[in-house]
Amino acid sequence: MNDSASHDREHTGPGTVAGRYLRTFWHPVYRAQDLAPGEAQQVTIMNERFTLYRGESGIAHVVAPVCAHRQTQLSIGWVEDDCIRCFYHGWKYDGSGQCVEQPGEDASFKDRVRIRTYPTREYLGLVFAYLGEGEAPEFPRYTDFEVEGVLEACIPEYWPCNYFNRIDNGCDGAHVRWTHREAIMRAGSGFRLSMPDEVVSEETECGIRHLSMNGGKLSDEYHYFHMPNVSQAAAYTRVEGSLEDAKTLRGDRISWRLPVDDENTVSFSVDLIYLTGEAADAYRERRRGTEELAMKEFPPPELGNQILAGRLREKDIDRRLSTATLFSVEDYVAQVGQRHPDRSRDRLGRMDGAVAMLRGIWERELRALDDGRPLKRWTPPSGTTKTVQAKSSVIPSGARNP
Ligand code: FES
Ligand SMILES: [Fe+2]
């Protein structure tokens, strides 16, 4: 049971209202560097399987999950040029989905066989696809991340929780002091340990902007939520790399939260750190080191599961783990600990203003979709990272949360 059974946000399979809504947007489906030329993978997004492969030319394709012949999983086949050949009887499809070879069959049969393909594009180190019906909308560019600096697509996070836990969290500045206190203390940057007196939020042309007020002053952090499932925020303290990096570097992070199915979520994040030249190269090396250590010795989901099971205390986690990765463990514990809650039972308070606004916007849009009314057209933001301070002083007081 959800807040609104008729406009259920929680289930996103084909035909569900939230699934139809999410399918009107482009989404990342894979980290680009993890897909080598000639490689195929099966991906599950919104309860639906797809075949993702990278042709030998380097172009990524997203196509139907199974072969048109007798429905064998296509990802186990072979990539040949920009085509994929089925493992079972060798039928071969080109990047447009057209069957181009059918060993043993009449020459004319293949012309009548085609599998579905999806518009695919690489951007910011991620492979994006449009998985909906009809013509794809214009591809949204996030120009804040197209500037000079170190651009890193983070290791994707596959977590066993409903995707809306992660979306909600993108509008929840109040959790930081508590959920991330260990990482913040380890980084020695106490500035984030004060509780904001007020959370100010407003609906914008791209989603929600929410900021924390402290002693009547705006915090130097910003949080933007871009509809339907993207968070963008300054990254202090959780810049991946050495402890010194976490203490001293400022970055910006953008994250897409996407349902794998109704009980599992994948999150793709991209970091931008404002370093160039030799400093950038040295930073990339430190970052590789801490990421590898985390993956090899301390995978966040494993640590998180141990904490949830009561077998590990967070304060006992090895201090070689970067504070950035510890942030991930901390978010995992909080959000996977929620599993797939009945959100109608939540008791939202004053500090949940942006969360309430987010849920209201989703409800409004799903209702419009269901009724066949026009949806709000969201514009990707530009200049968010640079103008946040300038914009901060102009939030209309009417937009303040109760
Ligand atoms: S099932 Fe693919 S070629 Fe037969
Ligand atoms: Fe968090």
Image (cartoon, helix red, strand yellow):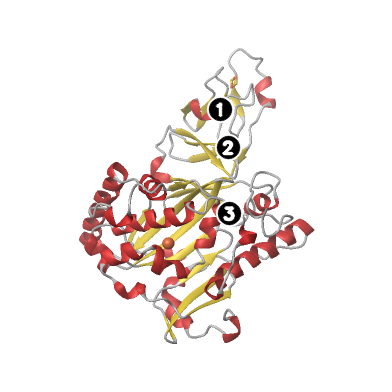
Q: Which residue is mark 1?
A: 73
Which secondary structure, mark 3?
loop
Which corner quadrant of the image does residue 175 belong to?
bottom left
In the image, residue 385 sits, relative to residue 301, either above or below, namely below
User: Which residue position is annotated with label 3?
Assistant: 341
- The amino acid pointed to by label 2 is Arg
For residue 58, above or below residue 369: above
Task: Pick the quarter of the image with the C terminus.
Answer: bottom right
Camera-near label (2 vs 3) is: 3
Marks 1 and 3 sit apart, C-alpha to C-alpha, by 33 Å
The residue carrying mark 1 has its beta carbon less than 8 Å from ligand 1: no
Q: Are marks 2 and 1 in contact (CB under 8 Å)?
A: yes
Amino acid type for the residue under numbered disc 3: Pro
Q: Amino acid at mark 1?
A: Gln
* Residue plotted at (70% across, 65% down): 364
Ligand 1: quadrant of the figure: top right
Q: Is residue 242 left or right of residue 43?
A: left
Can you give x and y, in whole percent of width and height, for residue 24 in the image?
64, 53
Quickly name the residue at label 2: 49
State the residue lying farthest toward the front: 310
